[in-house]
């Protein structure tokens, strides 16, 4: 075996190994994550806090970085997604201006999640709020996409 044929065989084996790795990564990407049926209630329902600790008129960031819990002055609660509906950047609550602001492209949202300033195409997504035994919980299983705020979006205790 000469040097050229030896190097050609090595390159062929490197190509085969790279192809197998690519195939394995592609398959793992396509079938990653838990199946919906395997999720436990503890995975999808997250306790935000006790109802008596969540004061009306306040906005609370949830520590997992996925949502803001807004309790309106009439006692209604709304769990707003942290992701801007334009390109998915994380919004920030500006208490002085009483609005959510996206730092990426300056979209602005009111405390109901409605768009005040584009380029965001629609209101912030929400999660279902559940009040049970004095605890406020949020169902993180799926986001609720909406065009604008509706009074029925609020949850009352």
Image (cartoon, rainbow, N blue to C red):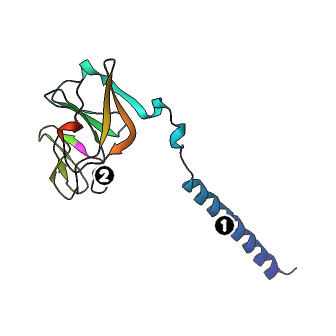
- Please name the residue shown 30% across and 43% down the image: 82
Callout 2: 10 Å neighbours few (<14), some, many (20+)?
Answer: some
Residue in front for this viewpoint, 15 or 156: 156
The residue lying furthest to the right in this view is 1
> Quarter-wise, where is residue 68 in the image?
top left
The residue to which callout 1 is attached is 19
- Please name the residue shown 55% across and 50% down the image: 32
In the displayed structure image, the side of residue 111 where residue 144 appears, left or right: right
The residue to which callout 2 is attached is 89
Q: Position of residue 140 (x, y in %)?
A: 39, 37
Q: Position of residue 58 (x, y in %)?
A: 18, 30
Judged from the image, the secondary structure of the residue bearing numbered disc 1 is helix
Magenta stretch: includes residue 86: yes
Magenta stretch: includes residue 10: no
Q: Position of residue 43 (x, y in %)?
A: 46, 33
- Please name the residue shown 66% across and 67% down the image: 19
Task: Tell me the chief SS of the magenta region.
Answer: loop
92 to 117, vertically: above or below = above
Callout 1: 10 Å neighbours few (<14), some, many (20+)?
Answer: few
The label on residue 96 is none
Residue in front for this viewpoint, 23 or 73: 73
Judged from the image, the secondary structure of the residue bearing numbered disc 2 is loop
Q: CA distance from mark 1 to mark 2?
A: 35 Å
Quadrant of the drawing holding the C terminus:
top left
In the displayed structure image, the side of residue 154 where residue 7 appears, left or right: right
State which tag comes first along the sequence, 1 or 2: 1
Q: Position of residue 39 (x, y in %)?
A: 51, 36
In the displayed structure image, the side of residue 102 where residue 39 appears, left or right: right
- For the record, the magenta segment spans 82-92
Residue in front for this viewpoint, 71 or 152: 152
């Amino acid at each position: 075996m000469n040097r050229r044929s030896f190097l050609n065989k090595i390159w062929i084996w490197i190509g085969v190994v790279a192809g197998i790795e690519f195939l394995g990564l592609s398959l793992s990407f396509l079938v990653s994550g838990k199946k919906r049926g395997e999720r436990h209630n503890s995975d999808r329902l997250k306790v935000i806090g006790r109802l008596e600790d969540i004061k009306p008129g306040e906005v609370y960031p949830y520590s997992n970085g996925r949502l803001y819990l807004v309790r309106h002055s009439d006692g209604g609660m709304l769990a707003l997604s942290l992701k801007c509906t334009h390109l998915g950047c994380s919004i920030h609550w500006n208490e002085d201006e009483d609005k959510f602001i996206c730092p990426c492209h300056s979209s602005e949202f009111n405390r109901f999640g409605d768009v005040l300033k584009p380029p965001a195409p629609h209101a912030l997504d929400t999660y279902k709020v559940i009040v049970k035994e004095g605890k406020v919980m949020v169902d993180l299983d799926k986001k609720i996409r909406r065009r604008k705020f509706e009074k029925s979006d609020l949850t009352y205790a």
